[in-house]
Image (tube, grey):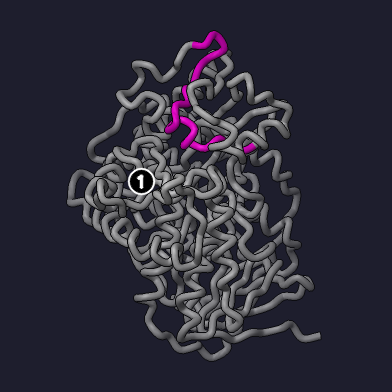
Amino acid sequence: MENPRITTDIVIIGSGMAGLIAALQLSQTRKVTIVTKTSIGAGNSEKAQGGIAAAISANDSFYDHIQDTLAAGYGHNNERVAKKLIEQAAPVMSAFFDWNTPFDRDDKGVFQLAKEGAHSRRRIFHAGGDATGFYMMKQLKKHVAENIQVLEHFMAYDLLMAKDRCIGVMGKNKENQLCKIYAGATVIASGGCGQLYPVTSNAEEATSDGMAMAFRAGVRLKDMEFMQFHPTMLFSNGRGAGLVSEAVRGEGGILVDEAGNAIMKNRHPLEDLAPRSVVSNAVFEHLQAGKEIYLSTQKVSEFTKKFPTVADNALAHGIDVTKGFLPVRPGAHFMMGGIETNEWGRTNKNGVYAIGEAACTGMHGANRLASNSLLEAAAGALLLAQHLPWQEQVTLWEEQEEACDIGNSPEIQALQENMDQWAGVVKEETNLLKMREWLKSYNHFIFSKGSSVLIKKDMTLKNMMTTAWLITNGALVRTESRGAHIRTDYSDEEPEWVRYAVCWENEKTEPVIRLNQERGSGHEPAIS
């Protein structure tokens, strides 16, 4: 039987918040096809607890929100892009109000805005207490238009490239047939890479597929060393057991050791509401010293009412929430790096765009401000839809498929454990070199093209190992500590590094250092 082919104006890889909003907007004038590797809407967007940051109340301002974002990003943000995306808060929230999203209100109908780490004001809209992503996505999925073609259980393998132009995507459909989708524009909205680590807040789908596909197509990626670890992942029976929202600390939660000592006291002016990188490092240091760390909820009024998702999850893992102490440890949470784009989602290759966590707009810099992720996803999707040029479909074109021998590949669990041990919350050269050498033994598998001979599980492993290579080597090159990138052998920020980004392009297996957009000029750091 001949393998199926599909032609469309736009193909979107991923069906989280960014992908669905882009599809809804673009389908008004163009034919849109969404491919998603499980069911529609599955992924990190649905799991978002804290909420969406939007400075639209009378006592707030976009200026203050921008300043908080830049401060959290440790000087590595693209200020122009951050400003553009944050100013989209009004149309983003207007859209979700129109979609009847049930954001929490008090008895008088006033929105119950929350405050999270490194925010100067209460500006976090939330729904269901701590189930914001679920309710936002629930309403969004209701509005997916009938004229949008959705292919569920479609595993994208590689972008189809005609020289430097992307003309679509190749993958396997739910019948396990090789399928090629030809499109004038291909939008990567496939999410992050948290599943590279054994303890993560991320959904099972977050295996860095879009980033790895972009790398193999020669699309530029940047800032892959900036992986954010959330400081409060519930920890039970030796395993991560789900996220404990930062909003819990915003309502009075305090991190303590087994003796009840507040570990953030005198550590940072904002104490428990310090930037995530600071809090994660503090928790990690205490764990390394053999101490157990808990999030005390004793000062949080009506904890189970305000945070039903966290409370129910803790109870499901045998933790008595009435005692007011939740065992926690850091877990992989958000990739600030990714496919380099401008504020409209455009990459350095014609025909391919990226939005959401798969993209690196520069908004977050070296450390994402809490609850800016849903805003970036939605705002990026709106801006993409407004600025995406009309592109004609390219005449069907065939390339010779490369063979890909999986050989003696490792198990995903081994990859996760090694990344946790050698390239986790805190890094140093010796361990990063161990991780690099381990990955080098699988170079043929990592750096070959996606192949139809690979089953979906093997393709997922290939994508994860590719991204592990980018993270590990990016962390080796950046010889400083900045934001979420923490190295014990280079503990200080280096002024010259603020102007530069570690980039990956043209399928090269080693990074290049490029001047950060709009960061001025200076002495270029040497790659060691």
Q: How many labels, in total?
A: 1
Residue 348 in sight from this viewpoint: no
Q: SS of the residue at dot 1? A: loop
Residue 46 in sight from this viewpoint: yes
Nearest the viewer among 459 and 129 is 129
Residue in view at x 36 percent, y 69 percent: 383
Q: Position of residue 302 (x, y in %)?
A: 54, 30
Q: Is residue 255 magenta?
A: yes
Nearest the viewer among 109 and 327 is 109
Image quadrant where one finds the C terminus: top left
Q: Is residue 170 above or below residue 270?
A: below
Q: Residue furthest left?
A: 521
Q: Which residues are magenta?
A: 242-260
Residue in view at x 33 percent, y 39 percent: 119
Nearest the viewer among 368 and 479 is 368
Q: Is residue 71 above or below residue 292?
A: below
Image quadrant where one finds the N terminus: bottom right
Q: Residue furthest right?
A: 1
Q: Position of residue 190 (x, y in %)?
A: 55, 61
Position of residue 228 in the picture relative to residue 242 (left or right)? left
Q: Which residue is mark 1?
A: 123
Rate crowding at label 1 as few (under 14), some (14 to 19) or many (20 or more) other CA atoms within 10 Å.
Answer: many
Asked which quadrant contains residue 315, the reply is: top right
Position of residue 441 in the picture relative to residue 28 (left or right)? right
Q: Position of residue 233 (x, y in %)?
A: 57, 33
Position of residue 185 in the picture relative to residue 243 (left or right)? left
Q: Residue furthest bottom?
A: 395
